[in-house]
Amino acid sequence: MSDHDHNNLTTKQLNAPYAWSMPDWPSQTQSIDKDALEVWGYVEKSSYVARESLNIRVSCSQPTYSVTITRDGLHPQLVYSQDSITGHRHEVPEESYANGCNWPVELEIFIEDDWKSGFYVVVFSVDGGEKGRFESDAYFVLRKSPQDRCGIALVLTTSTLVAYNDWGGANHYRGLGNDPRTEIASPVLSTQRPLGRGFLKKPAEAPRESHTFMPPIGWEPRYPSYEWARLYGYCRHHADAFWATYERPFVIWAEEEGYDLDYLTQDDLHFDETSLSSYSTVILVGHDEYWTWEMRDRIDDFVERGGGLARFGGNFCWQVRLSDDGHTQFCYRTPDNDPESDTNPSRTTTIWDYLPINRPAAATMGLTGMGGIYNRYGVAAPRSSGGYTIYRPDHWVFEGTDLYYGDLLGGTPVNLATFELDSVEYTFRRGLPYPTFEDGAPETLEILAMAPAVSGEDDRFEGHVPLNGPKREGEAIKHALGDKLPKHLLECEGRGAGMIATFTRGKGEVFNGGSTEWPRAIELRDPFVIRIARNVIDRFSKLDC
């Protein structure tokens, strides 16, 4: 679907109800109809090594179903296929979104030695003849054994996936309560449940979370990604997280370029202190909003020892906790709701800049979502340029781009600096931006390019038009955190920025692209964006493993 088609999708529905906000659009789950044409499944862990066995849990309403496993990427490789598997239907427990489905293991599949490190998509399917065909999917990452690790590690944003997956009724944003028009989040989410459709596979024409057209005067915002999902039976959050929207477009380009990537998950970082010890380069892509304390430790240690961190992503914001078995993620958002905030305040699951945590977000990534965040999302800076203005064109990041001071990088329709952006507190001196360092930014941080951003959408519609990122949500979080926020956040009136920045720490170096939309700009083969990505990866890849 082209941008023109996306705009038509919105136009055709201007006189219809807001499909994505209708109260009869529940989260995806198993049908109460025991004869429904469907099959759902999930893999017990997110990450494996060769010679382990996959434990796959499946519920199927039909007599038989099929399974394929494919290493995804530029040239998808089928590694396993089985048809006519006897189906068993298992009930979905109440609050499965928090406690898991607890289905029995239906399949055990041995991982052969010749399966390459990568991202694997497991597709479950049933064919109903005249009723059609139903597919759902799951995933796992195959990582290398410690003795084989070296070079570049792509870390998958699994914690953000968990936060947005609302299969079974809820996620970290909405789903609880009896009124589906009231958004009440679940602070507790299980990994032991299927994924909503669209996080792993979807058509190339699926809309993203920003618009490329120029809204007219008086425009009422619509959100094509939600409306498309409503019309075609995908998870409403398909464009907010993970592989199909973010990592996959980047991986396809990287493999075209000849980069050899190893694969890890954020869970690997959390549970394994040595997970990054043999790599020269770590890459983060897309939407990496949620992190645990331990995950940050691994990144900080990696850079300190001399590693290169290449972040082509945005919206570094929330601390979460994981259960000891990794099956449960916790994010209470406000300290009053978090049962551990009094006894263990540094691990409170809220924004990193909450003072009792004592670990500002900018200290790790250089930039933070609390310095942004939205651009060209609904009525959040809806008519901005969509790109970054260049301020330090002589920096090594821009070598070979022919960019000049004041040039626009990745403007609409490329939309590099859209959806969710990261920044730091800054000031201008003689035409150049400089960090103020009041938010914990590293002392070596250089701001290379900037774009405007806002903390949320202003409601100019007196509540009659649903907004998907209203400013009041961010204000409510700040109100809940009160005087335990740093002064610069308390004084913020909704104005922010997006940035491209670099810094050094210890023996290592960090590039932060500051936007979720690098994968899309790379997918569109913008020559300036491509050259920057090459510059960063090539520079960091030359570091010793």
Image (cartoon, grey):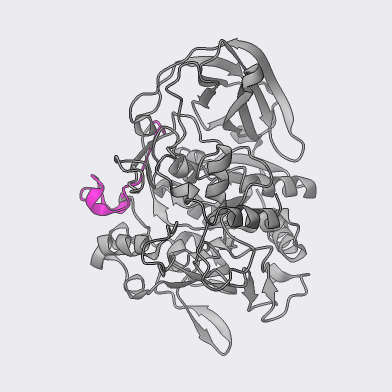
Q: Position of residue 34 (x, y in %)?
A: 46, 16
The residue lying at 35 percent from left, 34 percent from top is: 98
356 or 540: nearer the viewer: 356
In the image, taking residue 401 as reference, residue 509 lies left or right, namely left
Residue farthest front in this picture? 15
In the image, taking residue 8 as reference, residue 60 lies left or right, namely left
The vertical placement of 131 against 352, above or below, is above
The vertical placement of 431 against 102, above or below, is below
The vertical placement of 450 against 360, above or below, is below
Q: Does the magenta stretch include residue 43?
A: no
The residue lying at 39 percent from left, 62 percent from top is: 360
Q: Position of residue 271 (x, y in %)?
A: 45, 38
Tell me if residue 310 can be seen.
no
Residue farthest left in this picture? 342
Magenta stretch, main secondary structure, is: loop
Q: Where is residue 91 in the image (x, y as percent from the top left)?
A: 40, 19
Q: What stretch is highlighted in magenta?
A: 325-347
The vertical placement of 113 against 288, above or below, is above
Q: Position of residue 31 (x, y in %)?
A: 45, 25
Q: Does the magenta stretch include residue 340?
A: yes
